[in-house]
Amino acid sequence: MNFVIAVDGPAASGKGTVAGRLALAYDLPYLDTGMLYRAVGALAGSTGGDFRTAAITWASALNPESVYDPQLRGGRVGDLASRAAAIPEVRGALLDFQRSFATQAGGAVLDGRDIGTVIAPSAPAKLFVTAAPEIRAERRWKQLAGHGETVSFEEVLADIRLRDARDSGRASAPLVQAADAVLLDTSEMDISQSVEAARRIVEAARGRWETSHSG
Ligand code: C5P
């Protein structure tokens, strides 16, 4: 039994919150794959020299089990992460760990940009969580300000647009909604409404999945 929930979407769409709550609700292990790219981006950014070479070196040496660090959530790291994530060798170095996480016995929840398309293409439940860029920027701006970062709304919006363009435009595993993913636009929803809507989507998928696995 391997019930996998794949949650993809652009920066600050609310996918992390949704994925975390789904993991709790279904008692499944959860992997925030953005943290892997954030760790590589931050390490490569502080190494000096050629960014690409440093990112590939760090991605190959990374211990994916121990990357979680709230400091990595900062705005500048998001930019470094998306630069690192556009390098095919970096993505390749992080692939096995993510695929193993997704195929572990009992199932899992993963969020990122390419979960439903590349990491877990046969996941029975796929969500593509999005919201208008201005709404995402406002959410991210409030979050950063709450953590004491002094940054303007305009800067955050520009960063979101830049990351959207880079994530969607790259050749390797671009940000794209999987053909069988359900779109969840949270522009007009608060957190509890988004989580509730996600639960309904996953419940429907779980019903179909159980039917196909019974008998
Ligand atoms: O989701 P988060 O904003 O933490 O991700 C940071 C960056 O990592 C993204 O902008 C994207 O470039 C990259 N990423 C990716 N594939 C994933 C997860 C994140 O390319 N599965």
Image (cartoon, helix red, strand yellow):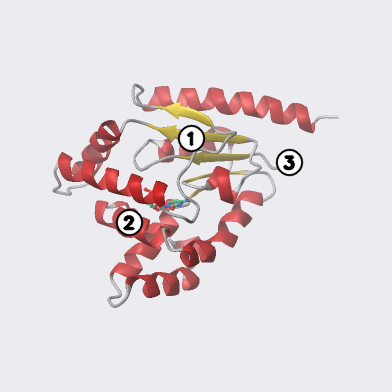
Whether residues under marks 3 and 2 lie with C-beta atoms below 8 angstroms apart, the answer is no
Q: Residue at x 37, y 28 (%)?
A: 191
Classify residue 137 as left or right of residue 118: left
Q: Amino acid at mark 1?
A: Phe
SS at mark 2?
A: helix
Q: Quadrant of the N terminus?
A: top right
Q: CA distance from mark 1 to mark 2?
A: 23 Å
Q: CA distance from mark 3 to mark 1?
A: 23 Å
Which amino acid type is marked by label 3?
Met
Does any portion of residue 29 appear in the rendered image?
no
Residue 189 percent coordinates (x, y): 36, 23
- The residue under the point 22% across, 44% down is 158
Among numbered discs 3 and 1, the one appearing first in the sequence? 3
Q: Which residue is mark 3?
A: 1
- Measured as percent of width and height from the top left, residue 138 is found at 23, 34
Q: Nearer the viewer, residue 172 or 185?
A: 172
Q: Which mark is residue 128?
A: 1
Decide: is 87 above or below 204.
Answer: below
The residue indicated by pointer 2 is: 72
Going from N to C along the chain, the mark reached first, 1 or 2, is 2
